[in-house]
Amino acid sequence: MTAAVTYESIKTCKQSGARLGRVHTPHGVIETPAFMPVGTQATVKTMSPEELKTMDAQIILSNTYHLFIRPGHEIVKDAGGLHKFMNWDRPILTDSGGFQVFSLSNMRKITEEGVTFKSHLNGDKLFLSPEKAMEIQNALGSDIMMAFDECPPFPAEYEYVKKSLERTTRWAERCLQSHARPQDQGLFAIIQGGMHEDLRKLSAEQLTSMDFPGYAIGGLSVGEPKHLMYEVLDYTTPLMPANKPRYLMGVGSPDALIEGAIRGIDMFDCVLPTRIARNGTCMTSSGRLVIRNAKYATDFGPLDAKCSCYTCTNYSRAYIRHLIKADETFGIRLTTIHNLHFLLQLMREVREAIKEDRLLDFRDTFFAAYGLNDN
Ligand SMILES: CNc1nc2cc3c(=O)[nH]c(N)nc3c(CCO)c2[nH]1
C-alpha cells in the first residue's frame, strides 16, 4: 500500500526519547511534536478556520461517531467531504467512533461483529463496526483515519483487557481490508493493553506486524493517575516503529504534553483547552486561572502577561470575567482563543527545545513556573 501519510525524522533528542519530525499528508505537512485541536462536530467550538490558522493549528481532529449520527456522513460526502464542508484545507484526523460510543452511549452491546448502541441524541438503535467506521471515514475524506477499536475502561480486569486487545487487533485487520482509498488516506492502528506491560507488548506486536502508516496509543487518559500513564508510555513508545508517527490519544494538559514529547510521542489531541474555556478556566504560564474569581473584577491586565495571543493583546481579565459572568459568547471565544494558542505555543517551544537538545531543562523551567514541581 503506497502510504499517503509518511513520517520524516528531523532530529532525535540526545537528552531523552523526544524527536522532531514531519508528518506528510495529502492536505499538508505537520511539524511534530504537535497538538491537534478537537473539532468533534466539524468545528473547533467557536473558532473560525482563519482564527485556527492565525494561531497555526496544523491539523484538527473530528469524530466519526458524532458526524455519523448528525448530520450523517452521506451529507458530508455530498458536500464534497469534511474539508469542504467545514472550509478547512489543512489536515484532518478522524477518530473511529469506538471511544465515543463507550463514553457517550449508555446502552451498548459489543460483539465480534461490532457495537450496537443507542444514539445519545434521540435513542435510535445504531451499529458501528470496523467496516462501517471505514465507510464513514472514507465518506468524510479525512487525511488520517483511526482503526475501529475498543478502549477498555479504567480499571479493567486483566483477562478482559487481553480479550479486548485481541478483538481490537482483529478489528484493525478488518479496517485495513475495507479501507477504500489507502493511496490517499492514512489509516492508523491503536495500541491497547491497559496498564499491563505484557499486554501492551502483545498489542504492539500484533499491530506493527500489519504495517500501518502510523500508530496510536489508546486506552490512556481514562482516569488513571498520571504517573501510571507515563509508565505505560515508558515501555510502549519504544515498541512503536521509529519511522512512523506516534499519536497519544486524549492527551492533554501542558505537563502531559511535555512528558509525552519527552517519551517520543509526535501527536496529541485533547478537548481540555476548548472545554475548560467554556467555563472560563484559562491556562497561563503560572498555572490555571479561573476568571470568574471576584479578584479579577478590577484586574485590567491580560490573562497572561507572557502571552502574545489576540485575547492577551487586546482584552483585560476584568473584561473577560464580565463576559463570562454575563454568559456572552464572545467571552468563550476569547478564552478559547487563548487556551488553544497557549497549547500550540507550548508545542512550538517544545519543538525548539528538542532542536537545541534542552527539552528536560525546558520541562523543569516550565513546571516550576506552572507550579507542577510538587506533583
Ligand atoms: C480524553 N481521553 C481519551 N482517551 C482516549 C482513548 C482512546 C482510545 O483508546 N481509542 C480511540 N479510538 N479514541 C480514544 C480517545 C478519543 C480521542 O481523543 C481518547 N480520549
Image (tube, grey):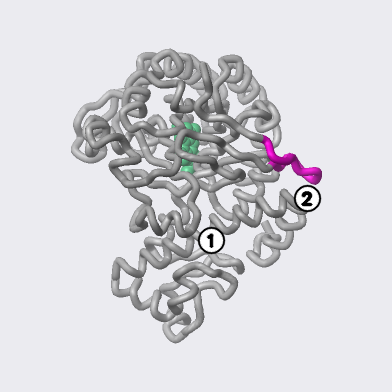
The x, y position of residue 172, in whole percent, is: 47, 19
Residue found at x 35% / y 25% = 133
Q: Earlier in the sequence, mark 2 or mark 1?
A: 1
Residue 10, magenta (yes or no): yes
Kindly give the residue lying farthest to the bottom in the view shown: 298
Q: Secondary structure at mark 2?
A: loop
In depth, the one of 325 and 339 nearer the eye is 339
- Cα gap from disc 2 to disc 1, whole angstroms: 22 Å
Apparent side of residue 36 relative to residue 201 in the rendered image (left or right)? left
Quadrant for residue 275, please give it. bottom left
In depth, the one of 177 and 278 nearer the eye is 177
Tell which tag, 2 or 1, sits nearer the viewer. 2
Disc 1 residue lies near ligand 1 with CB under 8 A: no
**What are the residue bounds of the magenta stretch?**
9-19
Residue found at x 58% / y 55% = 254
Residue assigned mark 2: 357
Inspect this view and state whether residue 149 appears. Answer: no
Quadrant for residue 31, please give it. top right
Q: Which mark is residue 360?
A: none
Identify residue type, mark 1: Phe
Residue 80, magenta (yes or no): no
